[in-house]
Amino acid sequence: MKLYYSPGACSLSPHIALLEAGLPYDLVKVDLKAKKLESGDDFLAVNPKGQVPALGLDSGELVTEGPVIVQYIADHAADKNLAPADGSNERRKLQELLTFINGEVHKNFSPLFQPVFSDETKEFFRTRLTGKFKYLDSLLAGNDYLLGGNFSVADGYLFTMLRWADAHKLDLSMFKNLMAYKDRVAARPKVQEALEKEGLMKAA
């Protein structure tokens, strides 16, 4: 498999999932502005959406959209328990979480990356994001991870969004469950490995 990624982008989520799953993969870095691979090839020829993450399968097929990719990874390493069994009530809960993080957290970050938006507009979205993180903080009360005691692919996604919150200086310090959770996920060896491979932290 090939994971098309950009350092620190939302592709960090499936990168973490691949490492936690123990599946073999190659990393292919993408320049999102130029839509080019490191080789100079056109990324749009690989993924016409022009976005990461994208997962190239050995069959030649391409899987896109982060929530779909991480579930695909989890299902191909079922013994790692990164997602509940397909069709179960717990799997529905995972899908709800992935959809919420994707639609209510991830997408509300988008304006913060755009220099054309005013500070007033960005503050509106920062306030919205704080409300979304408040809800997630409530889910973590008494739980190590979003689904309870076990790390799942939803946790890799939320961790990526928490890194974005740091990058945009979004103050979430009032959410004690979330802050302890971020540290807990960050301490996982495979999460640290993903950060190192993307050049987001110094190797030990």
Image: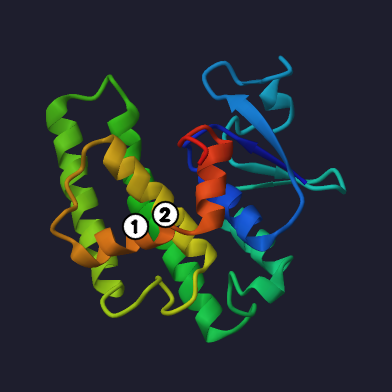
Residue drawn at x 43%, y 76% as measured from the top left: 147
Residue drawn at x 65%, y 54% as measured from the top left: 18
Q: Amino acid at mark 1?
A: Lys
Residue drawn at x 85%, y 47% as measured from the top left: 58
Which residue matches tag 2?
186
Is residue 172 toward the left or the right of residue 146 in the image?
left
In the image, residue 157 above or below residue 92: above
Q: In the image, residue 20 lies at what x, y percent?
A: 61, 60
Q: Secondary structure at mark 2?
A: helix
Which residue is the extreme one toward the bottom? 89
Which residue matches tag 1?
182
Q: In the image, residue 139 lies at what x, y percent?
A: 30, 73
Q: Secondary structure at mark 1?
A: helix
- Count how many numbered circles sit on residues in the image: 2
Quadrant in which residue 155 is drawn: bottom left
Q: In the image, residue 90 lies at what x, y percent?
A: 51, 82
Query: How far apart, in angstroms, are the residues tagged by discs 2 and 1?
Result: 6 Å
Residue drawn at x 48%, y 63% as measured from the top left: 154
Quadrant in which residue 159 is drawn: bottom left
Residue 204 seen anywhere in this rendered image of the structure: yes
Task: Decide: few, some or many residues near mark 2? Use Cα within 10 Å; few <14, some 14-19, many ≥20.
Answer: some
Q: In the image, residue 201 lies at what x, y percent?
A: 45, 37
Numbered badge on residue 30: none
